[in-house]
Image (cartoon, helix red, strand yellow):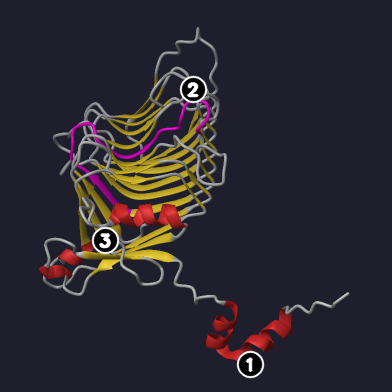
Amino acid sequence: MQRRESFSGMGAALALGTLGPQGAAGQTGAHLAGNGFVTLRPREDADRRTENRFAVCDPFGNEIDQTGTRTQGLQEAINYCARHGYGLLVIGGANATGGEPWHMNLTASETIVVPPMRFWTWTMRGMTLNGRMAGDMIHFDSLVNSHLDWTGTQLVYMGRQAAVHFHPRNTPPTDPTLGMGVNFVQIPNSISVYGQGARCVQFSPADRHGPIFGNKLIFGELNGGASDTAEGTRDTIGLMVDSAEGTAMFAANQIDVFAAHGCGARTFQIGSAPRRDSIKGNFWRLQATTVPHQTVLRSGETGGLYDIYFENSGLAGTTGVHLEAIAQQNRIRGYNNCATAHIEADLQGGAERHNRFS
């Protein structure tokens, strides 16, 4: 029997070192890898352009076609990531002494759609995303084991749906999991909405089969569009979680919001229908500035833990916390709360719900 030699460990390293990187690539027929990211960044003359302001390139520096784009190349970049399995890096810039340059402004006129993704990274820095469209601004399908970090980014949405909407409906590649699970999502700067009934962030589990679970979710400013607290505002919502059929459909998540303000009738809407146990066991840390005649937190959760800080509480008609009839076993700790905690009359025949305020 002929003996077969194999290179491994130090021997392989020595062999490759003798050949050199070009020789080794030639021997194996391999190409040196790129940076692993599809990139969207300003062109050198971006500030003098009205179209095609951003270049979208694959990890090896080849430009991706964006003919006919309605998102200045962002949708084309996401589609390429989904087809070829790369991360996404979006780079803008920073304010200059003369104001905000065009090379850090990206404008979309149709919904930016993120298909089902798994083990995906989307990093965005120094960018203002502007959106004026009938639907959501950014709409996510299933997202599993992924990382979104949009530090140094602001979103400005002029529409009546959601600026950022997580709505799992289809399974990601190579994974039977339909839903949104075990992700790190960080949007720590600003999301602003300027349309009647608009939501800064919305979560919509799919009935029975599409839970949103085990995620770390961090948001900074959720701006509902009011310029002050004296007159109230449009019926905008900072963060909304829809109810879904099934148990624990939005569950075991950690949610931080640093600075919600300018919202309408509700800042935080946790649950959209009387479905017991659909929203369950989440940990919330919420900070909000109130407006008159507003409910800061309205919830139908089971077993939630809330730390909530109220600023400018005690305004006319303001309710700090409103628990729906199905809410039970929640613990709510309020700080600087001059607003009135309110519990809706129990529609379940007087059953004890074990909610605690402190």
Determine whether, in the image, residue 10 is placed left or right of residue 51.
right
Crowd band around label 1 with a 10 angstrom C-alpha radius: few (<14), some (14–19), many (20+): few
Q: CA distance from mark 2 to mark 3?
A: 37 Å
User: For residue 196, which quarter of the picture?
Assistant: top left
Residue 173 position within the rendered picture, expressed as x and y whole percent measured from the top left:
51, 46
Of residues 213 and 68, which is closer to you in this image? 68
Q: CA distance from mark 2 to mark 1?
A: 63 Å
In the image, what residue occupies the spot 20% across and 41% down? 133
Q: Which residues are magenta?
A: 189-210
* Residue, disc 3: 127
Determine whether, in the image, residue 356 is placed left or right of residue 223.
right
Residue 288 is inside the magenta segment: no
Per the image, label 3 sits on a secondary structure element best described as: strand
Residue 18's tag is: 1
* Residue, disc 2: 245
Q: Residue furthest bottom?
A: 18
In the image, what residue occupies the spot 54% across and 34% down? 281
Determine whether, in the image, residue 318 is placed left or right of residue 26.
left
Of residues 181 and 28, which is closer to you in this image? 28
Of residues 109 and 330, which is closer to you in this image? 109
